[in-house]
Amino acid sequence: MKRRNRRVTFIVTAAMIAALYVVLSFVSKAFGLDSGAIQLRISEALTILPAFTPAAVPGLAIGCLLFNLLSGAALPDVIFGTIATLLGAIGSWRIATLWRGKRFMPFLLPLPPVFWNACIIPWVLKVAYGLTDVYWYLFATVGTGELLSCGVLGLILYFSLKPVARFLFKTH
């Protein structure tokens, strides 16, 4: 594929992932699952997509940014929530590139998004939304929600996409 076409494919893929993240986040919001101490954003399952395409890294960050802006999140949540998602996506991409072909690699993919969200979001909840819970309690609850979203749903998505990934995520 020509260089220009690769660039266009990258941008379109990132945009589609961002749009999907926003839509799935609004689905979670509709059911009241997206905020508070215990969060279960269905869209966080998409954090395994960097294993298939590097376009998922900016796609996930932009999707998180757009959802936080569109849903009326507090400014610290917009900024630091997006940073947490970006760091998680970069971490998943690095695991995929460093451990490609290893049998246990898929099970490592959810760890960066779980870690970064569990570390950053409790602080956001305390500062931006005034939650008075202890940081470590919020760390545990946010981490549990992320483990369910990224770990359980993300791995189901990973193993569902793996057989067709070369057709969905063409990069050359």
Image (spheres, grey):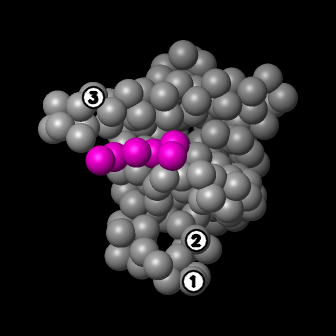
Q: SS at mark 2? A: helix
Q: CA distance from mark 1 to mark 2?
A: 8 Å
Residue 106's disc number: 2
Identify residue for label 3.
Answer: 8
Q: Nearer the viewer, residue 148 or 14?
A: 14
List the single residue furthest toward the left: 3
> Which numbered disc flags the more N-terminal residue, 2 or 3?
3
Verify CB contact (< 8 Å) between mark 1 and mark 2.
no
Image point (79%, 23%), residue name: 30
Disc 3 residue type (three-letter): Val
**Residue 63 placement (x, y as % from top left):** 48, 31
Identify residue for label 1.
Answer: 103
Q: Nearer the viewer, residue 156 or 3?
A: 3
**Residue 154 placement (x, y as % from top left):** 66, 56
Q: Is residue 106 left or right of residue 30?
A: left
Graded by Cα atoms within 10 Å as few (under 14), some (14 to 19) or many (20 or more), the crowding at tag 3 reads few
**Residue 136 placement (x, y as % from top left):** 64, 65
Q: Is residue 40 left or right of residue 14?
A: right
Graded by Cα atoms within 10 Å as few (under 14), some (14 to 19) or many (20 or more), the crowding at tag 2 reads many
Res 134 visible: no
The magenta span reads 167-172
Indicate the quadrant where residue 55 lies.
top left
25 shown above or below 47: above
Quarter the N terminus occupies: top left
Q: Nearer the viewer, residue 124 or 107?
A: 107
List the single residue furthest toward the front: 1
Image point (45%, 45%), residue name: 169
